[in-house]
């Protein structure tokens, strides 16, 4: 069993900053995926259909756009 060393304050802050930037980048990627999904023909066609019928189509388009960005 290896003993873990106490991280210095500087190391803790730098790791926190890196984690924060990773989360911000992921959030921007998701936002971009949403915008890309809204630009697709599927989404535009779904906007013209009744609300109840459009939910699965919109979710499917958003999922596809999200998977494409990963």
Image (cartoon, rainbow, N blue to C red):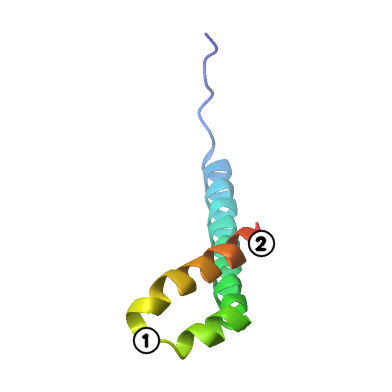
The residues tagged by marks 1 and 2 sit, at their Cα atoms, a distance apart of: 27 Å
Percent position (x, y) of residue 12?
A: 52, 43
Q: Residues within 10 Å of mark 1 (few under 14, many from 20)?
A: few
Decide which of tag 1 and tag 2 comes sooner along the chain: 1
Q: Secondary structure at mark 2?
A: helix
Q: Secondary structure at mark 1?
A: loop
- Quadrant of the rendered image containing residue 21: bottom right
Kindly give the residue lying farthest to the left in the view shown: 52
Quarter of the image that includes the C terminus: bottom right
Q: Are marks 1 and 2 in contact (CB under 8 Å)?
A: no
Residue 69 appears left or right of 43: right
**Depth-wise, is mark 1 or mark 2 nearer the camera?**
1
- Quadrant of the rendered image containing residue 49: bottom left
Q: Which residue is mark 1?
A: 50
Percent position (x, y) of residue 15?
A: 57, 46
Percent position (x, y) of residue 64?
A: 59, 64
Percent position (x, y) of residue 57?
A: 48, 72
Residue at the (54%, 81%) spot, across then down: 43
């Amino acid at each position: 069993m290896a003993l873990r060393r106490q991280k210095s304050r500087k190391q803790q802050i730098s790791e926190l900053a890196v984690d924060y930037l990773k989360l911000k980048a992921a959030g921007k990627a998701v936002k971009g995926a949403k915008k890309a999904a809204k630009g697709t023909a599927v989404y535009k066609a779904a906007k013209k259909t009744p609300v109840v019928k459009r939910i699965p189509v919109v979710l499917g388009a958003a999922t596809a756009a999200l998977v494409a960005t990963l």
